[in-house]
Image: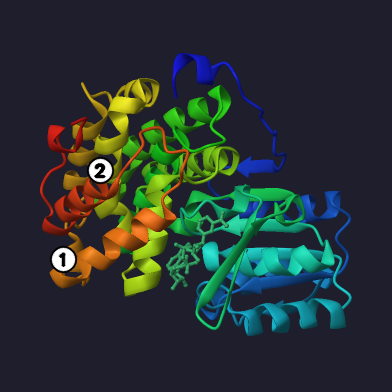
Amino acid sequence: MSATAELTFSHDTLTSRVVFGAGRARTDLRAEIDALGGRRVVMIASDRDRALTRELSGVLDKRLVGSFTGVRPHVPVEVAEAARGLAEELQADLLLSIGGGSTTGTAKVVALTSGLPIVAIPTTYAGSEVTPVWGMTEAGRKTTGRDRKVLPRVVIYDPELTLSLPRALSVASGCNALAHAVEAFWAPGATPLSSALAERGIRALAEGLPAVAAAGDDVTARGNVLLGAWLAGASFAVSGSGLHHKICHVLGGAYDLPHAELHTVVLPHVLAFNAPACPAAATGIAAALATKDAVSGVVALLTRLQAPVALRDLGLREDQLEEATDLVLDGAPRDNPRPLDRGDVARLLHAAWVGTSPDASEGPR
Ligand code: NAD
């Protein structure tokens, strides 16, 4: 954003109550549900979380009237309908979601039609719990929308619940949060407040992620990554998505590439492309990473995390690059801070496909 653009903005304050701290899911859940008047709670959680949900449901006593465990990635419409049907049949007055972005997403689509309040306990770093964005998939096509009804009323962040996330999933999910915070600097709805949240979020992620990668049982490091995930999600909730997320969405959808890995490969290249047009973003990201410049800081962090670097390693073929260029150009936001033409997209995708370290070659020509 230019200095003038930074002083012209509209900011929607999105309000959720956030309860943060190790052990707090166990100690605070019941009081939080009582404060919202929840008497007929339906829990949404995947089967994976059975032991945890059994334990947490114990504290809810008779308030828990049922559970939905049919969570699937990207919320297929039939899953949404089954979860809505259960909530209606049991006359739920509150939804409790415990799990990653797919679980939160399932609770959101129930809230979208029922207006029920959600208490969310995230167990990954996806950040969906603090955004008003919902998504649903029908016949392979994902529809998304924004509605304040789906924003959880209370979020309980408990780093202990992320201890079970394996290393690879922790890194991938944490990098997804990093992408939210980086993109929040230049996405169309960015404001000085969302940028401040993003900067603090990047700092927490940069501190926590290498430590989590080295020792997954480090609760303080887990806490830092979860803090980063919250702030990154909160900044992204305000700013909306921009070029980076559009590229990932298009490539992921067209070539079925893995979502989280795609983010880590594409992010440094989009940052290298946009940074010259957004000096405030470049300065903020570099400050958060305590490095001289934003691009080398992000590359250094991803290298430390041994994140993948090349689209060819994720399954994209070289002969698909031409078509991918057209698809990305078609979906690219018109309001990207640096205008881009076909040549720019082709160069960016080629560099990301080969896995060359992004540098001045993606800067202004
Ligand atoms: P996910 O919820 O699908 O979880 C990934 C895997 O991790 C699953 O197998 C799950 O069972 C497992 N898992 C979750 N927590 C675990 C834990 N603590 N220990 C061990 N395993 C665990 O994936 P995700 O990355 O959390 O979320 C991705 C989804 O969220 C995507 O559909 C994405 O579009 C959506 N999302 C939405 C928003 C939004 O604002 N609406 C924001 C970010 C992501």
Q: Is residue 78 left or right of residue 355?
A: right
Mark 2 element type: helix
Which quadrant holds the N terminus?
top left
Dividing the picture into quadrants, the one containing residue 121 is: bottom right
Residue located 43% across and 28% down the image: 199
Nearer-the-camera pick, 251 or 297: 251
In x, y percent, where is residue 20?
Answer: 59, 42
Residue, x 66% and y 51% (percent of image)?
132
> Which numbered tag is attached to residue 126?
none
Report the number of discs: 2
Label number found at residue 312: 1
Question: Relative to 82, is 36 above or below?
Answer: above
Determine if the C-beta at disc 1 is less than 8 A from ligand 1.
Answer: no
How crowded pointer 1 is (Cα within 10 Å; few <14, some 14-19, many 20+) is rated as: some
Characterize the local packing of mark 2: few (<14), some (14-19) or many (20 or more) Cα atoms within 10 angstroms.
many
Q: Residue at x 39, y 35 (%)?
A: 202
Q: Position of residue 124 (x, y in %)?
A: 47, 58
Front one among 200 and 139:
139
Dot 1 amino acid type? Arg
Question: Residue 252: x percent and y percent?
Answer: 36, 67
Which residue is under mark 2?
A: 268
